[in-house]
Amino acid sequence: MDDMATEARAWQNRLVAEGKLLTFAPEGPVPSLDEIEELSRGWGTAVSEALDWTRGKW
């Protein structure tokens, strides 16, 4: 592991120990990007349109 990865892991461990970060193990296999694309095929542009609608209102 390189120095940057080691520092990131130490930072994550500290945040978990302080109760500022929650971690969990997935309950099953994590789908690949190809599987996600296949599952979401046909959903249309609803998410993009919702994001566009809220931009600048924060």
Image (cartoon, rainbow, N blue to C red):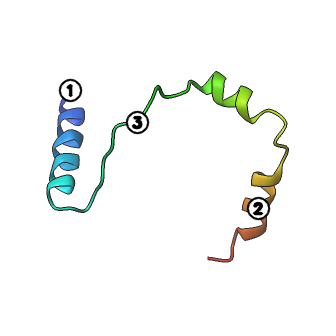
Q: Is mark 1 in CB contact (under 8 Å) with mark 3?
A: no
Image side of residue 42 versus residue 1, left or right: right
Q: Quadrant of residue 50?
A: bottom right
Q: What residue type is labelled 3?
A: Pro
Q: Which amino acid does label 2 sit on?
A: Ala
Of discs 2 and 1, which sits in the foreground? 2
What's the mark number on residue 2? Answer: 1
Query: Which circle's residue, 1 or 3, is located before the other in the chain?
Result: 1
Who's the residue at 41% across and 35% down the image? Answer: 27
What's the mark number on residue 26? Answer: 3
Q: Which amino acid does label 1 sit on?
A: Asp
Of discs 1 and 3, which sits in the foreground? 3
Query: Which circle's residue, 2 or 1, is located before the other in the chain?
Result: 1
Quarter of the N terminus within the rendering:
top left
Who's the residue at 30% across and 54% down the image? Answer: 22
| 52 lies above or below 48 | below
Q: State how far apart marks 1 and 3 are (Cα).
A: 26 Å
Q: How crowded is the residue under tag 2: few (<14 C-alpha within 10 Å), some, or many (20+)?
A: few
Q: x, y percentage for residue 17?
A: 14, 55
State the residue in front, 1 or 21. 21
Q: In which quarter of the image is residue 32?
A: top right
Who's the residue at 65% across and 22% down the image? Answer: 34
At mark 1, the secondary structure is loop
Q: How many marks?
A: 3
Residue bearing the label numbered 2 = 50
